[in-house]
Image (spheres, rainbow, N blue to C red):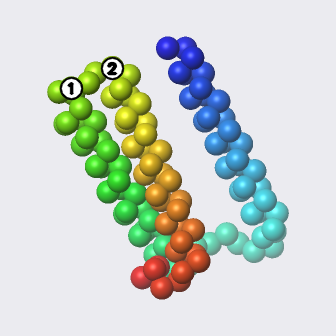
């Protein structure tokens, strides 16, 4: 069990370092500009978050309603973590697509 927690800690640490370094790079690039979102940013983020929520709720329904009849223990935990990772991946992918294709923002 400690191996799994250790792996999770390593992944969470890498994610935190990448996130903070990305924020620092953005702030350095926009040193004089305020970091404000406009309507386009909010529309892209809202659409991506909405679709990611559907992925997340589908995964949690599978984990909480379907899987307990056939599986237990770590299979449930790992599948729940997979649902969370898939939802976040969908969100970030849709944000990238939204900035590449502005017509998808509305």
Give SS at disc 1: loop
What is the spatial separation of the Cα atoms under label 1 and label 2, in whole angstroms? 11 Å
Residue drawn 65% across the image and 30% down it: 10
Q: Label 2's element?
A: loop
Residue 50, image x, y percentages: 37, 63
Q: Quadrant of residue 41?
A: bottom right
Residue identified by numbered label 2: 73
Q: Which-is-in-front pick, marks 1 and 2? A: 1
Considering every residue shown, the one lying at the far top of the view is 1
x, y percent for residue 8: 56, 29
Q: Are marks 1 and 2 in contact (CB under 8 Å)?
A: no
Q: Position of residue 80 (x, y in %)?
A: 37, 36
What is the residue that sits farthest to the front in this orientation?
70
Q: Quadrant of residue 17?
A: top right
Residue at (64% x, 42% y) in the render: 15
Q: Quadrant of the C terminus?
A: bottom left
- Please indicate, yes or no, whether residue 15 appears anywhere in the rendered image: yes
Residue located 41% across and 70% down the image: 47
Q: Name the residue tied to disc 1.
A: 70
Q: Quadrant of residue 69?
A: top left
Q: Which one is nearer the viewer's eye here, 106 or 34?
A: 106
Front-most of residues 68 and 26: 68
Residue nearer the viewer, 28 or 56: 56
């Amino acid at each position: 069990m400690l191996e799994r927690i250790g792996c999770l800690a390593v992944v969470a640490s890498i994610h935190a370092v990448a996130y903070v370094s990305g924020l620092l790079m953005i702030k350095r690039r926009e040193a004089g500009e305020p970091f404000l979102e406009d309507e386009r940013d909010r529309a892209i983020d809202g659409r991506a978050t909405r679709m990611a929520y559907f992925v997340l709720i589908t995964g949690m329904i599978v984990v909480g309603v379907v899987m307990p009849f056939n599986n237990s223990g770590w299979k449930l935990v790992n599948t729940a973590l997979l649902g969370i990772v898939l939802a976040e991946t969908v969100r970030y992918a849709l944000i990238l697509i939204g900035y590449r294709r502005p017509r998808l923002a509305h």
